[in-house]
Amino acid sequence: MSDESKSTEEPSSAAKADAETPAGDADAHKDERKDEHRADRKADRKEAKRADRKQSRKDAGAKVKAGSDAVRNRIASVVWLIALVCALFLAVGALLIALKANETNTVVQFILEGADRLDGPFSRQDGIFTFDGANAAIKNALVNWGIAAVAYLIVGKILDRVIRP
């Protein structure tokens, strides 16, 4: 036999490899690619779930912060309202005394008793400032309760700013 007949009779090594590779191996390679693709999709889904959980935690944290901010705002508003009402009692009480309102009236009594309870060191009888002579009671009430009203407003606003987020 000549070399030519050998080459025509014997298939080449590439042809042998193709001939030896059954159709099942090609399917196996295709299955491997599908498995890799599935694994990639599975990894992508896991990563997406992880990102969703992380975002959920951030959202939950934001909700908690918003809730606590709302509570702090409400408390600050209540503190400011209380300070404002106290200052109002003191100012109206001083005005009633200055106008020489009827102290036997129940509304006037209520306001004057409330102001007396709230005045603390700013009492109209023996407060920070005491006046003698004519109209001393009116001057004592106006000055001491006026200072007390301003003090309530200042302290109330400071507390409001400290409490509010």
Image (tube, rainbow, N blue to C red):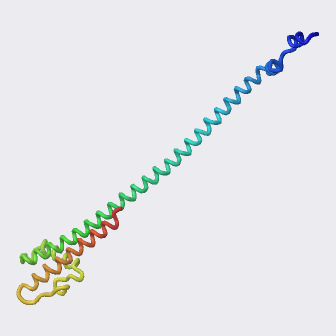
- Splitting the image into 4 quarters, where does residue 26 fall? top right
- Splitting the image into 4 quarters, where does residue 122 fall? bottom left
Quadrant that contains the N terminus? top right
- Splitting the image into 4 quarters, where does residue 112 fall? bottom left
Considering every residue shown, the one lying at the far bottom of the view is: 132
Q: Is residue 12 above or below residue 37?
A: above
* Left or right of 5 on screen, residue 83: left
Q: Nearer the viewer, residue 105 or 149?
A: 149
Q: Is residue 23 above or below residue 95?
A: above
Quadrant that contains the C terminus? bottom left
Name the residue located 83 percent from the left edge and 20 percent from the top edge: 13
* Left or right of 45 on screen, residue 63: left
Q: Nearer the viewer, residue 84 or 20?
A: 20
Q: Nearer the viewer, residue 52 or 84?
A: 52
Considering every residue shown, the one lying at the far right of the view is: 1
Name the residue located 68 percent from the left edge and 32 percent from the top edge: 35
Q: Nearer the viewer, residue 147 or 108?
A: 147
Callout count? 0
* Left or right of 112 on screen, residue 162: right
Q: Is residue 137 above or below residue 1?
A: below
Name the residue located 7 percent from the left edge and 89 percent from the top edge: 133
x, y percent for residue 49: 55, 43
x, y percent for residue 151: 23, 75
Name the residue located 64 percent from the left edge and 32 percent from the top edge: 37
x, y percent for residue 80: 27, 66
x, y percent for residue 118: 23, 77
Considering every residue shown, the one lying at the far front of the view is: 3
* Left or right of 122 on screen, residue 39: right
